[in-house]
């Protein structure tokens, strides 16, 4: 297993108001950023409860996507708006470049031994994995073989398109570009095909809208992670996950202590508890379906891996290359695919 490098983690993730969890007995309080939606619900129910019961720590959550966490921390100008970040690889690199994290000492994690070697470093620790591929409705379309299929019948007319605003969207579109003969440095083949199918695709929408569109039957094909597929299937939606012939993509999500945090010890306990076996076990089960990084926890049956060690067999990406190009891709997608 490769270690977590400064520029890349095993390369590379989901609103509501931030409602503090209050416990009159709690003697220590902290704030943590959390992805809106499923992550918010899961960490409030599982992680916050265990922190309160086992460590007498109360935590308030600030639901923010990764790029919004970076933006909010930058705008705070040295006064951290929360104690702990939760980030995918691209925003993690941005946070490192902007010096937004406290130095991290993995030896302070009592649960360090359950992580694969290299999954905690001088900047933070891995807390969950994601596997990205193609989701499809087996009652409506046959199983796609790979990324190129999405631009052909019967898939293109049932496809939900979303842009580069998320990690899963970015790496999916990169893999499509590669399948079409392009690369990170040459996305023209991708945009040529996107423009060609644009008049006929089922939907072009924000990433958060995709699961709902699929559940409502407005789209029957989308690129997403196993977490979304398993969650929708648990709700009775006919959906399957297809590993593209070039391989599924994978990345890990990490947590980091915010620079200037006044609750550093509580932040270590927060991250330590997140990777502990009881919490990872609960988060990997229904109704949350996280992909665990803990070596002692087996991923769910719908995840195309049997342990975190299998992640090395998946397609990974270099975010030091991607990050400088991503804003231009976002703008181009918005410009060429809008309307």
Image (cartoon, helix red, strand yellow):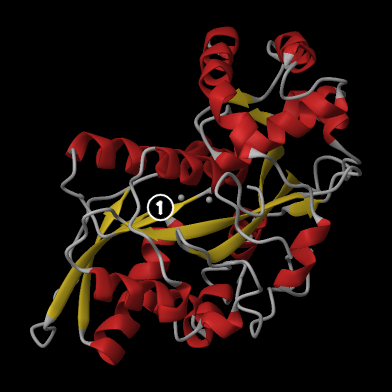
Q: Percent position (x, y) of residue 300? A: 69, 73
Return the residue at label 1.
35
Kindly identify the residue that appears in the image at 82 percent across and 23 percent down.
151
Left or right of 156, for residue 142: right
Left or right of 36, for residue 281: right
Q: Nearer the viewer, residue 182 or 197?
A: 182
Q: Is residue 267 above or below residue 282?
A: above
Q: Is residue 3 above or below residue 337?
A: below
Q: Percent position (x, y) of residue 108? A: 40, 80
Outermost residue, left direction? 24
Q: Nearer the viewer, residue 262 or 224?
A: 262
Quarter the N terminus occupies: bottom right
Asked whether residue 235 appears in the rendered view, the answer is no
Kindly identify the residue that appears in the image at 47 percent across and 41 percent down.
91
Q: Secondary structure at mark 1?
A: loop
Q: Is residue 276 above or below residue 65?
A: below
């Amino acid at each position: 297993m490769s270690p977590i490098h400064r520029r890349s983690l095993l390369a590379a993730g989901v609103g509501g108001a931030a409602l503090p969890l209050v416990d009159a007995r709690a003697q220590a309080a902290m704030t943590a950023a959390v992805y809106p939606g499923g992550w918010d619900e899961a960490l409030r129910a599982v992680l916050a409860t265990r922190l309160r019961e086992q460590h007498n720590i109360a935590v308030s959550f600030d639901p923010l996507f990764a790029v919004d966490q970076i933006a909010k921390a930058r705008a705070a100008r040295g006064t951290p708006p929360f104690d702990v970040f939760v980030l995918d690889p691209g925003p993690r690199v941005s946070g490192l470049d902007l010096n937004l994290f406290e130095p991290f000492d993995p030896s302070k994690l009592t649960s360090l031994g359950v992580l694969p070697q290299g999954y905690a470093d001088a900047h933070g620790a891995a807390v969950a994995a994601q596997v990205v591929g193609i989701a499809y409705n087996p009652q409506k379309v046959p199983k796609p073989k790979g990324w190129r299929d999405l631009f052909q019948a019967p898939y293109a007319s049932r496809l939900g398109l979303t842009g580069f605003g998320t990690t899963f969207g970015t790496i999916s579109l990169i893999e499509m570009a590669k399948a079409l003969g392009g690369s990170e440095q040459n996305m023209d083949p991708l945009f040529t095909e996107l423009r060609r199918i644009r008049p006929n695709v089922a939907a072009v929408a924000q990433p958060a809208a995709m699961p709902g569109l699929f559940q409502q039957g407005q789209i029957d094909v989308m690129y997403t992670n196993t977490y979304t597929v398993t969650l929708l299937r648990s709700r009775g939606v006919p959906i399957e996950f297809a590993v593209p012939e070039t391989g599924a993509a994978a990345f890990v999500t990490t947590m980091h202590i915010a620079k200037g945090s006044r609750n550093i010890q509580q932040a270590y306990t927060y991250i330590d508890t997140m990777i502990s076996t009881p919490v990872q076990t609960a988060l990997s089960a229904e109704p949350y379906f996280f992909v665990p990084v803990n070596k002692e926890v087996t991923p769910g049956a719908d995840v195309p891996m049997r342990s975190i060690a299998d992640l090395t067999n998946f397609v990974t990406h270099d975010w030091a290359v991607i990050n400088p190009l991503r804003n231009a891709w976002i703008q181009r997608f918005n410009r060429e695919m809008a309307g």
